[in-house]
Image (cartoon, rainbow, N blue to C red):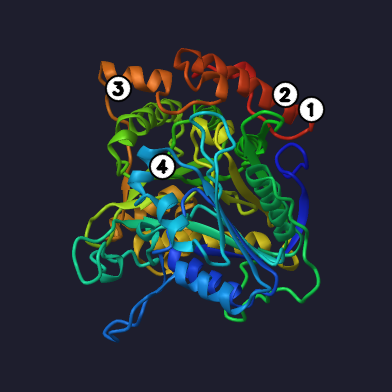
Amino acid sequence: MLKAGVTCWRVETAPRAALLVDMDPYLQAARAVMASATRSIHFLNWAFDPDTILTHAPEGSGSEPLCIGPFLRDLAEARPELEIRILCWQSALPVAATQRFFPVRSRTFFAGSPVDFQLDGTLPLGASHHQKVIVVDDAIAFVGSCDIGPDRWDTPEHRQPDARRAKRAGKTPCYDCRHEIMAMIDGPPAASLGEMFRERWQRATGEALAVNETTAPAAWPEDIRPDLTGAMAGVARTQAPWKAFEERREGEAATLAAIAAARTLIYLENQYFTSPIVAQALAQRLEEPEGPEVVLVSTQHSPSWFDQMTMDRTRSAFLHQLEVADRHGRLGAYSPVTGTGETIIVHAKLAVIDDRYIRLGSSNMNNRSEGFDTECDLVLDAATANDGAGPACVEVFRHRLIAHWLGCEEARVSDAVAGKGGLGKAIQALAGEGYRRLRPLRSEPLGPLARFVATFHLGDPISAGDSLRPWRRRAASRRKLAQAVRQLEAARLPAPDIEAVTGI
């Protein structure tokens, strides 16, 4: 599935890859790596808020938590040789308002400090820079779904209420529970992510950055056990064409190749399921008598009114298409809740294919993330990882995720999957035993306005050409699917059957 120039930028070996579930483990690992940095710390984010808590004080200690802004500022002031740069999307005012006006807050906070904070507006009107990456010394990198914001923090336990998620210290209410997935990798893929950062930095600021190799790089923390060693890795980029910058749709190609390549299981976690291209590819696999099972995990309802009116309506059409195609009973769609029944926001962007491929990053399964917004995803092939034990390690990771959702032991999930012969049946069986934190997610009837929104994918352009012309969106989707399929077929990679396309 990894093909340089098609489904990814390059194919490289990652000596180590750790899969970090939810923001607290990610931030603890990132803090340890950043503390050992010797050359540079580079951030790419959709949003960055300096008030994001990096480390909470022990409960009852009376100490103040450590926030990421002061941590970076103090680190830069104490070590002048260390270059710390933050590059964020220059967001539109309505979006910035939902994120505590992070552009103004961050620029004000870092003004006069050695930390170089910049905003990037070099993209088509209406698009966003959506990547979520930290690169330390071009040696260790983090890539995944998580931005730096106070409302992102949570633990795998998803406690509600949790005083550590309070919007104001010692006060209620709390931020909603939130689920993220980040990868921590080292070696050549981390260096490639560093190169990607420098390319964007130069595009945004005009400043060309040299690679610093004069000192020993940051070290992998001893307490972080890698999930995969020696896995093949590809960085999949998405970029809309803008001025002299070419279009990149590696993420879309990776998604379609993964769906077409699956033999037994397609497991997807995502904030949005709206892409007609992805819906068509999944529907084709569900219609096959011996195709893979498909398991989706997403939030019951989007937290914002705009997304409820647009993305949720279109997701219902997405789900309906899969339900109609599910002639053999292999579809499972779920929304997670806490142990006390509150909604968990699924912000992760994850695909696990069989016991071989893991793809995670910033791309949603919607039109925007396939070619309009700037995205970065990591694709890991575990076929030869861990001295041949990579597939078993992928299975362990997937069962760890399901156990975290259900609030049970990993061994119970493994036993249920083995006993029932599939992940969906295992989830149903465990629900019968009282583990009901994954609730069925179904399509809903759409009224005339909702059908109009879903038909034209309002708020979800696939390219700059249809961003202000929604009536062109369905035709644009058909063209982009045909283009992607031709590219995959030319590279001798698995691809959807373009002749069978009926849902776009």
Query: Which quadrant is the N terminus positioned in?
Result: top right
Q: Along the polypeptide, which appears first: circle 2 or circle 4? A: 4
- Per the image, the residue denoted by label 1 is 490
Q: Please tell me whether mark 4 sits on a helix, a strand or a loop.
A: strand
Amino acid type indicated by mark 1: Ala
Q: CA distance from mark 3 to mark 1?
A: 38 Å
- The reply to whether dot 2 and dot 1 touch (C-beta < 8 Å) is yes
Q: Along the polypeptide, which appears first: circle 1 or circle 4? A: 4
- Per the image, the residue denoted by label 4 is 332
Using a 10 Å C-alpha cutoff, classify the residue at mark 1 as few (fewer than 14 neighbours), some (14 to 19) or many (20 or more): few
Q: Along the polypeptide, which appears first: circle 3 or circle 1? A: 3
Q: Residue at x 60, y 73 (%)?
A: 33
- Which one is in front in this view, the residue at disc 3 or the one at disc 1? 3
Q: Please tell me whether mark 1 sits on a helix, a strand or a loop.
A: helix
Q: Along the polypeptide, which appears first: circle 4 or circle 3? A: 4
Q: CA distance from mark 2 to mark 4?
A: 30 Å
Q: CA distance from mark 1 to mark 4?
A: 33 Å
Give x and y (percent) for residue 22: 44, 62
Q: Is residue 143 visible?
A: yes
